[in-house]
Amino acid sequence: MPWWAWVVLGLGLILLELLTPLGFSLMFFGVGALVVGALVGLQLPMPLWAEWVLFSVCSILAMLLFRRPLLTRFHTRGRPLTVDGMIGESATALEDIAAGATGRVELRGTTWNAHNTGAGPVARGQRCTVQKREGLSLWVRGS
């Protein structure tokens, strides 16, 4: 395979990694392709099967050595995910929700199941504060 094809493959895989949240997996195959492209570009005599073996070995080795440190560095541990950031936000009740009962609220343009944790009812159209999120349900309290 020509050297430029390996470089295009490598850059494409790295770009695809940047565009999708796959958790640092395609990037290492892109690095492996760039390494093979560089070696083929240096006129290192290799049969096609050896290029593919070298690509596989470089990719897997890079993944084993660098994936965990990158995940540790860039992923938040102990901090809530973005979706958990909705705690404290105001939702709008889509129906009357009695104290301790379940109903529907709207938050960020999405309809959610909501449990009223407050002592009083939440009326339809009333703003309520999100106390916690669990799965696809919110725990709310009337404002």
Image: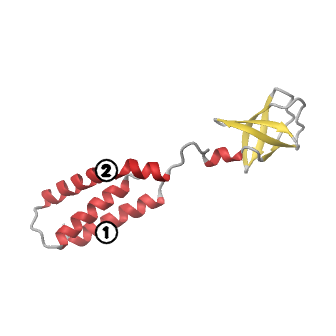
- In front: label 2 or label 1: 2
Q: Amino acid at mark 1?
A: Val
Question: In the picture shown, does residue 109 fall above or below 3?
Answer: above
Q: Nearer the viewer, residue 103 or 21?
A: 21
Instruction: Measure the C-alpha gap from mark 2 to mark 1.
Output: 24 Å
Q: How is the image coloured?
A: secondary structure
The residue at 13%/57% (across/down) is 50
Question: In the picture shown, does residue 61 fall above or below 48?
Answer: above
Q: Position of residue 130 (x, y in %)?
A: 77, 41
Q: Nearer the viewer, residue 1 or 67?
A: 67
Dot 2 corresponds to which residue? 65
Say which quadrant the N terminus sits in.
Answer: bottom left
Dot 1 corresponds to which residue? 8
User: Quick one: label 2 or label 1, which is nearer the N terminus?
Assistant: 1
User: Which disc is residue 30 wearing?
Assistant: none
The residue at 25%/72% (across/down) is 4
Residue 79 relative to residue 62: left or right: right
